[in-house]
Amino acid sequence: MFYWLQKNLPRIVISPSFAVILWFVYGFILWTFYVSFTKSKMLPRYDFWGIDQHFRLWSNPRWFTAVENLLIFTILFVVICILIGILLSILLDQKIRAEGFLRTIYLYPMALSFIVTGTAWKWMLNPTMGIEKLVTDWGFTDFTFDWLVSREMSIYTIVIAAVWQSSGFVMALFLYNNHPTHDATSFHEFHCNSASYIDKEL
């Protein structure tokens, strides 16, 4: 009995978390998928109605706006995070000065929740209390930075916040990938290791 418990202790420890994730993430994904085929509006109704709800969604102009914003966010977020992550990992792998300072700056956002990150960036990007107000208080009265309240530019503020939150994690992934060959200190060798890692993941 003791041997069985010692052998299966890791599974026992993570099983509650696994069960919660399975139920509250994937379970509700399946529930939402089923509800999309019913007559549900504000409250769920479980009478099967087919794909009429999907046709109503696809005929709504907001659907195309949402898809466009999703594509913009996905492309910019993935590309910029990879580029910044590779650049930072190369710099840190070269043992530059202030390595610990840079590492702290870009790994610290990983310790913050998305709610804290979103609130902080909302304050900074708010034209009445953030960057725009700070610069205008310095005397640059013609300066404007109102992306947060601009319909065309607001999606890019989300990209900025998300990149700041996640680029340090991408940097850590590339550093971890390169660690087994830590003697590869040249840019070419690091680039080859990073490229092979990206190719393997994709």
Image: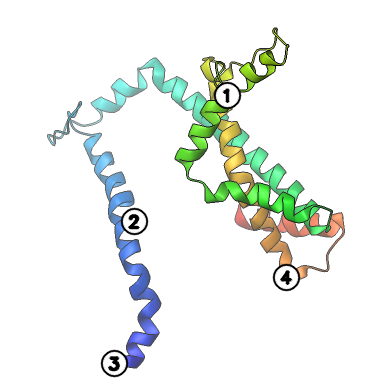
The numbered mark, 3 or 4, whose residue comes first in the sequence reads 3
Using the rendered view, name the quadrant where residue 197 is placed. Answer: bottom right
The secondary structure type at the circle numbered 4 is helix
Q: Please tell me which of labels 1 and 3 falls first in the chain.
A: 3
Q: Alpha-carbon neighbours of circle 3 within 10 Å: few (<14), some, or many (≥20)? A: few
Alpha carbons under labels 1 and 3: distance apart:
59 Å
Would you say 48 lies left or right of 94 here? left
Q: Amino acid at mark 3?
A: Met
Q: Looking at this view, is 8 or 58 the one in front? A: 8
Q: Earlier in the sequence, mark 1 or mark 2?
A: 2
Q: Residue at x 29, y 92 (%)?
A: 1
Q: Reply above or below: 66 against 118.
A: above
Which residue is pictured at 59% across the width and 15% down the height?
146
Q: Residue 95 location, x and y as percent?
A: 83, 59
Q: What kind of residue is marked 2?
A: Ile
Label 4 crowding class (10 Å Cα cut-off): few <14, some 14-19, many 20+?
few
The residue that disc 4 covers is: 180
Q: Nearer the viewer, mark 1 or mark 3?
A: 1
| Earlier sequence position, callout 3 versus callout 2 | 3
* Quadrant of res 21: bottom left
Q: Residues within 10 Å of mark 1 (few under 14, many from 20)?
A: many
Q: Nearer the viewer, residue 3 or 56?
A: 3
Return the residue at label 3: 1
Q: Residue at x 33, y 88 (%)?
A: 4
What residue does disc 1 label?
125
Q: CA distance from mark 3 to mark 4?
A: 38 Å
Residue indicated by mark 2: 21
Measuring from the top left, give residue 85's x and y in whole percent. 69, 48
Left or right: where 102 falls relative to 1: right
